[in-house]
Image (cartoon, coloured by chain):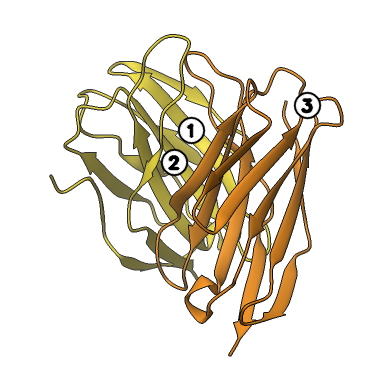
Amino acid sequence: NAGVTQTPKFQVLKTGQSMTLQCAQDMNHEYMSWYRQDPGMGLRLIHYSVGAGITDQGEVPNGYNVSRSTTEDFPLRLLSAAPSQTSVYFCASRPGSSGSYSEQFFGPGTRLTVL
Amino acid sequence: GENVEQHPSTLSVQEGDSAVIKCTYSDSASNYFPWYKQELGKRPQLIIDIRSNVGEKKDQRIAVTLNKTAKHFSLHITETQPEDSAVYFCAASPMGAGNMLTFGGGTRLMVKP
């Protein structure tokens, strides 16, 4: 298993540009999520999905869109990049089952710089 | 929503000493508390977790304690080694479908040889 994969590893954008960060997992996990990590602020939840066709907002959703058309893929779209979106983005997945919790697996991250 | 605070933000210890990192949470419905280790430039990786029906859990040199009444939990690392140097994050979540983790701000642990 490749686990959780993310592309690209690095990206530089100009203010106002749009782009999609890709995330895929091959573990048949129901739950997937996107976090951003800023220095000294830990990981903050952007959006998450509990299954194909179902998404919801996290703590910091503004400026980002997501969709979940398949179990494997959970892309994150930046609509109009701003310098405040400069961060490291982590995708994560975990098995889903009602009433229980399980380990969350993280992807390797995408380092995004917005000029 | 949940709010998790983590202290200290940096911690420096001598090799062989113990290290303790503390977290508090606000939502009494939270009942799952994992700890992640993140080495420089790498992804966070789970090192230990505890559920609210347990007060303490140990795995070799790592232990976690939970006080539900006071809403705090702690990570204890004994006999620290240079390879323990990393950023450690605590997190909290209610169990159940769709509940995601809320993370603390992280603790940078430095183990001096």
Q: Residue at x 29, y 25 (%)?
A: A68
Task: Compute the Cα span from label 2 to label 3.
Answer: 28 Å
**How many angstroms separate mark 3 from mark 1 (CA)?**
28 Å
Q: Residue furthest left?
A: A1
**SS for callout 1:** strand
Residue B1: quarter of image: top right
Instruction: Tell me the residue at 53%/29% (across/down).
Output: B100
Q: How far across and how far down the image is residue A78, in percent?
A: 42, 47
Return the chain for callout 1: A
For disc 2, the marked residue is A34
Locate residue A82, reporting x and y percent.
Answer: 55, 57
Dot label at residue A47? 1
Disc number placed over residue B68 in the picture, else none: 3
Q: Amino acid at mark 1?
A: His
Q: Colour of chain A?
A: yellow
Answer above or below: position of B66 versus A112: above
Q: In orange, which chain?
A: B
Closer to the eye: label 3 or 1: 3
In the figure, residue B79 lies in which quadrant? bottom right
